[in-house]
């Protein structure tokens, strides 16, 4: 893609003034309509027919320009949330302060439709007016709970976004790419640049640091010099963000292409502010992080081939090098040791208690499996535990540096390691016969000897 001329402004404060965007017309960019989800056209065409403006926006436009298939599609429009919902029976509004419409389609697909917004700091005060006013023409109106005109123009919406390469619009009606912020120039230069002053934008929302690092890592781009220079002095602010929000961001990085992102997070010193004591150990002990990176590479390759992993599996794998380093000299009930270890971690990303419990169960069985492969002593009653199948799959990451084949399980791995050992038998459990009858239920904790 030829390097385009930058648009005339680059400061968010200038977005309140009339801004002429730089536009790439049809034939001047590589985007093909056949690469866009047909349901995107349904949404945009219907909004257009009703008198609204609507564009494809963000990461989808960026990925289409790079020739990559987008992972999702987002639409932005001058229609207000209530107006969007009235025109799509399959639309549901989410959010409180900034309401968004999620338009649902078959197979669980969701396309997010948002209203053009402006930076609230730049917005003039307005009287509260009900959002139910339903006129395509005229300015958007804030809902009763809002006392600022949070809705804006396409230019204002572009300038409030995080990075220049994620603030591009595609008009699917004309096939024009619209750039208010210099994103096309940064795409040509393979740079990730924060919009506006990096220090100010990072202080406003520290999660922007994480997003900058993620975009650069996944795209193989460099971080623009001023943006990168501001990261060390602001990264500690990430720890003060809501834990539920950090957990959501963490799940994005574990869902696909995890290894390059975690390596970048570690390189920029962000892991301690996300994973607490675990992140500190990974940052200060390269041998532990190298092991994490290796596991994530195996997971990424497996996911690219179509395998899916549960949250419990992915987090058990992510934390295994840290757990393993603590189990070497541990004595006693492994499950109790793991519970105590996680209770003292205090990760900034708020991992749900139910997920932690599943991780502990899975890792306790993994610990029994790894010890069995060293000693030949395996407690096969663990096969009845709910988390045994997850552990049976993850043990191949640890012991064989790969995912298992369809016919493989821990039992086959054990027999390969100890060919003379008897095959684990499936014994029927007898019911309790009443007072004095035998107690045949397995104990709560895994065997540790």
Image: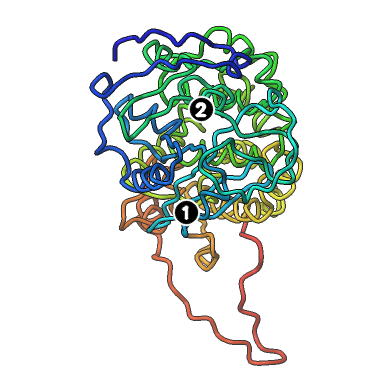
Q: Nearer the viewer, residue 379 or 298?
A: 298
- Residue 243 to residue 27: above or below: below
Q: Nearer the viewer, residue 412 or 122?
A: 122
* Separation (CA) of disc 1 from disc 2: 21 Å
Label drawn at residue 252: none
The residue at the point 26 percent across, 36 percent down is 33
- Residue 29 to residue 252: above or below: above
Image quadrant where one finds the C terminus: bottom right
The residue at the point 31 percent across, 39 percent down is 36
Left or right: residue 281 compared with residue 110: right
Left or right: residue 343 compared with residue 377: right
Image quadrant where one finds the N terminus: top left
Proximity of marks 1 and 2: CB atoms separated by less than 8 Å: no
Label drawn at residue 87: 1
The residue at the point 42 percent across, 28 percent down is 169
- Residue 213 to residue 74: above or below: above
Q: Position of residue 22 (x, y in %)?
A: 40, 15
Q: Mark 1, residues whose alpha carbon is within 10 Å: few (<14), some, or many (≥20)? A: few
**Residue that mark 2 sits on:** 154
**Mark 2: secondary structure:** helix
Q: Position of residue 401 (x, y in %)?
A: 40, 39
**Is tag 1's residue or tag 2's residue first in the polypeptide sequence?**
1
Q: Mark 2, residues whose alpha carbon is within 10 Å: few (<14), some, or many (≥20)? A: many
- Residue 41 to residue 66: above or below: below
The residue at the point 61 percent across, 71 percent down is 442
């Amino acid at each position: 893609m030829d390097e385009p001329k930058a648009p005339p402004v680059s400061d968010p404060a200038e977005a309140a003034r009339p801004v002429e965007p730089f536009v790439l017309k049809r034939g001047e960019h590589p985007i093909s309509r056949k690469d866009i989800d047909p349901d995107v056209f349904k949404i945009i065409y219907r909004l257009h027919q009703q008198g609204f403006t609507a564009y494809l926006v963000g990461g989808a436009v960026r990925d289409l320009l790079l020739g990559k298939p987008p992972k999702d599609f987002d639409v932005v429009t001058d229609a207000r949330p209530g107006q969007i919902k009235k025109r799509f029976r399959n639309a549901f509004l989410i959010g409180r302060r900034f309401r968004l419409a999620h338009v649902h389609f078959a197979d669980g697909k969701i396309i997010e439709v948002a209203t053009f917004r402006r930076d609230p700091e730049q917005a003039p005060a307005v009287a509260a007016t009900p959002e139910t006013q339903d006129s395509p023409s005229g300015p958007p109106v804030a809902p009763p709970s809002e006392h600022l005109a949070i809705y804006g123009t396409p230019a204002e919406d572009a300038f409030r976004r995080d990075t220049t390469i994620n603030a591009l619009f595609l008009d699917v009606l004309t096939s024009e790419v619209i750039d208010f912020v210099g994103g096309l120039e940064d795409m040509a230069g393979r740079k990730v640049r924060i919009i506006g002053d990096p220090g100010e934008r990072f202080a406003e929302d520290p999660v922007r640091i994480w997003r900058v690092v993620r975009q650069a890592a996944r795209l193989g781009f460099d971080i623009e010099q001023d943006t990168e220079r501001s990261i060390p002095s602001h990264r500690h602010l990430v720890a003060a963000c809501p834990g539920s929000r950090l957990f959501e961001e963490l799940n994005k990085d574990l869902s696909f292409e995890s290894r390059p992102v975690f390596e970048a997070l570690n390189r920029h010193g962000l892991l301690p502010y996300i994973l607490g004591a675990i992140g500190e150990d990974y940052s200060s002990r390269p041998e532990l992080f190298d092991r994490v990176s290796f596991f994530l590479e195996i997971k990424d390759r497996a996911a690219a081939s179509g395998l899916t992993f549960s949250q419990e599996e992915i987090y058990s794998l992510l934390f295994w090098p840290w757990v393993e380093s603590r189990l070497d000299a541990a004595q006693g009930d492994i499950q109790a040791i793991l519970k105590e270890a996680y209770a003292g971690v205090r990760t900034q990303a708020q991992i749900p208690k139910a997920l932690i419990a599943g991780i502990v169960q899975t890792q306790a069985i993994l610990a029994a499996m790894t010890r069995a492969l060293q000693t030949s002593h395996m407690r096969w009653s663990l096969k009845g535990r709910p988390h045994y199948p997850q552990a049976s799959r993850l043990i191949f990451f640890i012991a064989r540096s790969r995912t298992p084949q369809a016919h493989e399980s821990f039992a086959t791995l054990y027999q390969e390691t100890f060919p003379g050992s008897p095959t684990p038998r499936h014994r029927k459990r007898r019911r309790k016969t009443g007072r004095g009858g035998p107690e045949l239920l397995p104990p709560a904790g895994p065997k540790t000897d």
